[in-house]
């Protein structure tokens, strides 16, 4: 009987130790961000660095809002998560325009990213986000060692660019999917 009690005590201690150990490795709670204008929410694995930059373009000065999380020392399948959004002059860029104008907008956005990464497109498809036009693109860079997965959406005159960079071997991972799926528009199509 005493041996049975000792064995039960050992099992209980082992179970408690296991719970304590596993709780120390619980997955991080993702951080939801929402801009002041309350038009969307998105989740990052950790709090991203946020900034605003003014950039000169062919159509004039634009405000580029940026949220970036570079993984660095933290364990993750990806290296970087990013969101960039900008409002364009409504008369020049709008999701209500004819397809050929929207196609040109996406082509230019994708071409710029490919050039900056010195990469090449390995996958591109047209998508609808809610009822808004978009593109999902994968770019191979660093001589095939890296993948940049990009989702671009045009909502009225605002462009949203969501990016996840990873090693090629980590493409299509759960954290990448979670990031892209966490993007939610708060505005309704008029």
Image (cartoon, grey):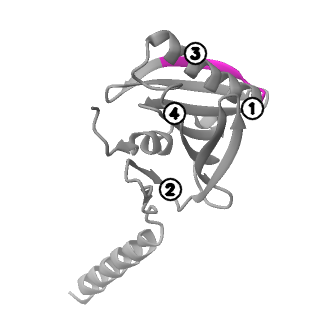
User: What residue appears at the point 32 percent right and 46 percent down from the top-left corner?
Assistant: 186
Residue 104 numbered tag: 3
Residue topped by disc 4: 172
Residue with the most extreme top position:
100
Residue topped by disc 1: 117
Identify the image quadrant of residue 177. Answer: top left
Q: Earlier in the sequence, mark 4 or mark 1?
A: 1
- Quarter placement of the C terminus: top left
Residue 163: percent from left, percent from top: 57, 39
Please tell me which residue lies in front, 1 or 78: 78
Residue topped by disc 2: 45
User: What residue appears at the point 64 percent right and 21 percent down from the top-left corner?
Assistant: 108
Identify the image quadrant of residue 34. Answer: bottom left
- The residue segment tinted magenta is 117-125
Task: Describe the element under mark 2 as helix, strand or loop.
Answer: loop
Task: Describe the element under mark 1 as helix, strand or loop.
Answer: helix
């Amino acid at each position: 009987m005493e041996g049975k009690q000792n064995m039960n005590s050992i099992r209980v201690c082992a179970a408690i130790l296991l719970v304590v150990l596993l709780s120390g490795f619980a997955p991080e709670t993702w951080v939801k961000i929402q801009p002041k204008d309350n038009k969307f929410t998105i989740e990052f694995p950790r709090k991203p660095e946020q900034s605003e930059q003014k950039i000169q373009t062919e159509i004039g000065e634009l405000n580029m809002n940026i949220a970036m999380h570079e993984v660095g020392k933290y364990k993750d399948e990806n290296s970087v998560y990013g969101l960039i959004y900008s409002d364009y002059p409504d008369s020049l860029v709008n999701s209500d325009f004819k397809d050929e104008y929207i196609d040109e907008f996406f082509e230019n956005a994708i071409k710029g990213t490919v050039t900056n990464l010195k990469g090449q497109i390995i996958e591109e498809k047209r998508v609808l986000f809610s009822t808004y036009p978009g593109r999902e693109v994968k770019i191979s860079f660093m001589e095939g060692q890296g993948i940049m997965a990009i989702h671009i959406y045009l909502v009225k005159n605002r462009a949203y660019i969501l990016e996840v960079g990873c090693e090629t071997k980590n493409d299509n991972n759960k954290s990448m999917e979670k990031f892209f799926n966490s993007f939610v528009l708060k505005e309704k199509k008029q």
